[in-house]
Image (spheres, grey):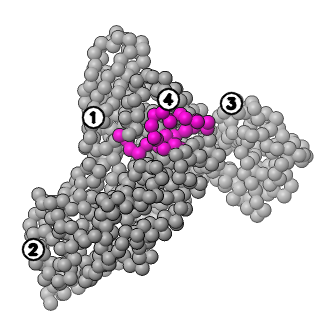
Amino acid sequence: MSKLVVGVALAAVAVAVLLLSATPPDGKAAAAEKTLEKPASVSIRFGLLADSGNLTSAVLGIGLSPENEEGRLLVFCRQKPIWKSAIILDYPQAPGLPRNLSDEVAAELARCGMSSRKADAEDASSSPSAVVIAPTGAVPSSLADRAEGMAGINSRVIVLVSLPGRRIDSLGRLEEGQAPPSFELVEILPGRERQAACDAARKAIGEQEEDALVVQSPPAALSVAVYASRNATYCRAIYISERACRVADIGPLEPKQGRLYAPQRATAGQPVIFEFSLPEGREAGRSLRFSAVSYLDGKEVGRKEIAGGTIAGGWASRFALNFSKGGKYTVVVVDQFSREHAAAYLEVSGLSILPVRQEGNRYEFYAEFGGKPAVGAFDVWLDGGGKGQFYSSNGTLVVWASPQAGKRTMHFSFLGLHESWDFEAAGGGVWEAYVRLGLPAVIFLAAVFFLLRARKEPRYVITFPEFAHAAPKAVELEASDFERAWAAEEGKLGRHSLPLHAEEIARGLFMGRQKPNIQSVYACLRQLCKEGRFAECGGGLFIPRSKMGGFSPSQLSSLRLLHDIMLERGLRFLRSWKIRVGKAGLEICVFRGKRLVLEGISSARRAILFADEEERRAFEQSLEENDAESIRIKIALENGRLILVCAKRQEIEAVLP
């Protein structure tokens, strides 16, 4: 009874606190309104060009204000100066357009913090690095005749068009004529003139840049990396929310004189090899001491002295760094005079386990690997006990355990990384589970958690329910049932013969009517793999061996990820060794040996898809042999016709249109 009274009292206090926070006094309300009125801003706190594998990235530190506001951030980089001034063309308009269309464009530009001025055709066409907006309804002939010269001085032309295929001269006369290829057109729909003005202004600031990096609901401070040229680079950050639109620029970012090669992706806890080099003649005759400085989100987190000495001709050295946790790192080589000689950017995948809730003997965690929800099998064990396997689905990891009372440590292992969680167990093991949950729950726990002590499930037996709050039941299935379930669910992906997650196969087994314990489904699939009926691919994916079609499990795992990303972007996918990507001048080839890397290359770019970082690293090391094939491949890499891509979401997204 006393516990009930205490609980009611606590609930009343909580309700009172909520009511007070929801209805602040007038002074607090005014302060809150004043905070909301604070103008939004975006700033680029730092920026540098860094080597990133065989590519170059512009690494930028972005700051946003106010915090916790829903919006999106766009970042892009260019080799030429980004258009900072806007010119609105003062010119005759096609019939039917409102006279204030120019004012609407200017107002939207001002909302984004970009100034504008009106100018005639002669002034507009001679202004370098400007964006010229023509709210004329048809292509201005005076600008069309100067299109080539305007492109030469880094100027853009955006035309609001209500009469496609028509031009208008300086006297307002209309004639047949197309827009020059360099002109950008914004269509004016009847009654939507204001929307067209907004679209033209947003296009002018760069919101519609096709290769911009987009971050939804960004934090107040973040670091981003955008693929860039190794030449001087200019970058822009655009922040857009419901009430604000702001722009920040930086540049030119100058490349370092030296090179610092490192893999684009690495794993926390494992040594990463860096190769530092200076060009011939750079710093010749000087005696220098070098250090490798590591930065995480712009803050120095490590410093290590590396090989140095008297520079004779060029300079080259190798060193290793070990990163203790995941994140986006920049490593800069500096000398004793704090001069920067080379920089590299790499993303380190780490393992993060966060407790979510505990219900009796059910422990739920949120698992992240490399900054994304973890998917796959975890090895889990208590203190120094035996290991058991539990499956993480989209970051949700559920572990069944009945620890003895006292201080305990739960250990997690995933893809070679380890994490642990210290907690205070209040229970008394299986006996307490019996007292609190009853005999059915204890039976269920014995069937699931005591797998940690090497007990084996019967073959092809699925247990229910998903949680331990009801009496368990079991369903016996045959191997053919799993194959039919795979076929039914894989058909929803387009019948490309791709591997599926255990949850997807479970959905096919029971048509979504029931939710089985996913650990038992996983155990059955593992048993089928041992018997040769199924194959397990990376990331906890499964496929019947009869459907592999000559691909290895790791290659099929890569193709499944590629399929999912292409589906999200509306791109056509076909399971093949070579996949053409629409009209983007890109083909993606699954790596199957050095000899086939350049075979039949015809498109502007070819991306070679590697199953993992180790496979890509081994291939890159093979290029040091300097045989004829290696030389051809290195030339293709240097001129950008060949790209090496690891089967990771961010790398694939970076090369797709």
Sequence-first disc among 2 and 3: 3
- 562 to 452, vertically: above or below: above
Q: Report, in whole angstroms, how far the alpha carbon at label 2 lies from the one at label 1.
A: 45 Å
In front of the other: 68 or 26: 68
Residue 98 lies in quadrant: bottom right
The answer to whether residue 507 is seen in the rendering is: no
Residue 646 located left or right of residue 95: left
Q: Report, in whole angstroms, how far the alpha carbon at label 2 lies from the one at label 3.
A: 78 Å
Residue type marked 1:
Leu
Residue type marked 2:
Gly
Q: Residue at x 28, y 44 (%)?
A: 268
- 365 to 173, vertically: above or below: below
Give the residue number, with chain letter if any, for mark 1: 321
Sequence-first disc among 1 and 3: 3
Q: Nearer the viewer, mark 1 or mark 3?
A: 1
Q: Nearer the viewer, mark 2 or mark 3?
A: 2
Q: Nearer the viewer, mark 3 or mark 4?
A: 4
Q: Secondary structure at mark 3?
A: loop
Mark 4 touching mark 2, by CB under 8 A?
A: no
Q: Report, in whole angstroms, how far the alpha carbon at label 4 lies from the one at label 2.
A: 63 Å
Residue 481 lies in quadrant: bottom left
Sequence-first disc among 4 and 2: 2
Give percent across and percent down for residue 173: 91, 46
